[in-house]
Amino acid sequence: MDAVKLFGSRVPADVLASLQAHLGRRPRVLAWGRTASGAVVAAWDRLCVQDADGWADLPWHDILGGGWNDETGELRWTRMSTGEQGAVALEAPNDLPEVFRERVEATFLFQQAVYPQPGKAVMITARRNLAEGDDRVVWTAHPARGVRMEGETLAFVQDRLAELRAEYAF
């Protein structure tokens, strides 16, 4: 068998075999797209990007934002943990842009803006970790541009985060 058919597109067997070797298990593939130097696979719990150097993984709950740019043909994202931005040009996106959006949105359980000072917002978010065996819910606080997480602001956010975690015991 040369390929596996999923959601109307054929995932080449060599791509699946390579991804399986990388993950150490058979991936639950939802969609995929072809790039000039590899592939991008939307698995159940992560986005996997292949290039000439191998595979890189992005857990869905670590993607702060991003999406498909139809004009440039790029899928882009920002990592929550590092702030790093990434993008990949897709030659054949198939269903990947829609699945990307659905998987990122599926991780959001709760989101609330809190204001340590008037006009200074910090977004507190609870995200579902779709990977097995890890913490099931990841709580984070992201300051708006110009808000520094130090001193009274940090103390306020930590207190509010603790209150929300207790209130929403996911």
Image (spheres, rainbow, N blue to C red):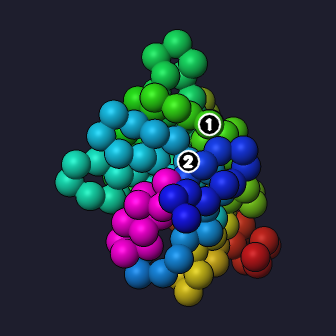
Question: Callout 1: few (<14), some (14-19), or many (20+) C-alpha neighbours within 10 Å?
Answer: some
First in sequence: mark 2 vs mark 1: 2
* Dominant secondary structure, magenta: helix
Can residue 140 be seen? no
Q: Residue at x 43, y 58 (%)?
A: 15
The amino acid on which the numbered mark 2 sits, given as a three-letter code, is Trp
Q: Is residue 84 left or right of residue 68?
A: left
Q: Is residue 51 above or below residue 81?
A: above
- Look at mark 2 in the image and give the residue it sits on: 32
Q: Find numbered disc 2 in the image and state the secondary structure of the residue it sits on.
A: strand
Question: Callout 2: few (<14), some (14-19), or many (20+) C-alpha neighbours within 10 Å?
Answer: many
Q: Which mark is residue 94?
A: 1
Q: Is residue 142 left or right of residue 114?
A: left
Q: Residue at x 76, y 78 (%)?
A: 169
Q: Which mark is residue 35?
A: none
- Does the residue at mark 2 contact the one at mark 1 (Cβ under 8 Å)? yes
